[in-house]
Image: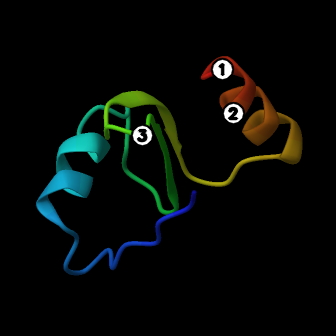
Amino acid sequence: MVLAADCDDPEEEVVELAKQIEDAYMLPFVIVADSEGNYLGGVSGMQTPEGLRALLGASD
């Protein structure tokens, strides 16, 4: 599932997840969470296809 959040007015749950991304200073943020909303991983800024694949694979 994918969720897009308004970066100018994000939901509090999204803010709490984003706080867990190390060095989260540049958009876009990619946050990986489980079905209960628990943080599994995340990145900030531009990602290569390989980097995104690695992030998604690391959360299996």
* Position of 46 relative to 22 (above/below): below
Residue drawn at x 29%, y 31% is 20
Q: CA distance from mark 2 to mark 1?
A: 7 Å
Residue drawn at x 33%, y 79% is 6
Q: Which residue is mark 3?
A: 35
Left or right: residue 58 versus residue 30 is right
Which of the numbered marks, if any, corresponds to residue 60?
A: 1
Residue 50: horizontal and vertical position, in percent? 87, 36
Q: CA distance from mark 2 to mark 3?
A: 14 Å
Q: Quadrant of residue 9?
A: bottom left
Determine if residue 8 is in view: yes
- Quadrant in which the C terminus appears: top right
Which of the numbered marks, if any, corresponds to residue 17?
A: none
- Quadrant in which the N terminus appears: bottom right
Q: Which is more N-terminal, label 3 or label 2? A: 3
Left or right: residue 46 versus residue 9 is right
Q: CA distance from mark 1 to mark 3?
A: 12 Å
**Mark toward the viewer: 2 or 1:** 1
Residue 24: horizontal and vertical position, in percent? 37, 43
Residue drawn at x 26%, y 55% is 14
Q: Which residue is mark 2?
A: 56
Residue drawn at x 66%, y 54% is 46
* Cβ atoms under marks 2 and 1 closer than 8 Å: yes
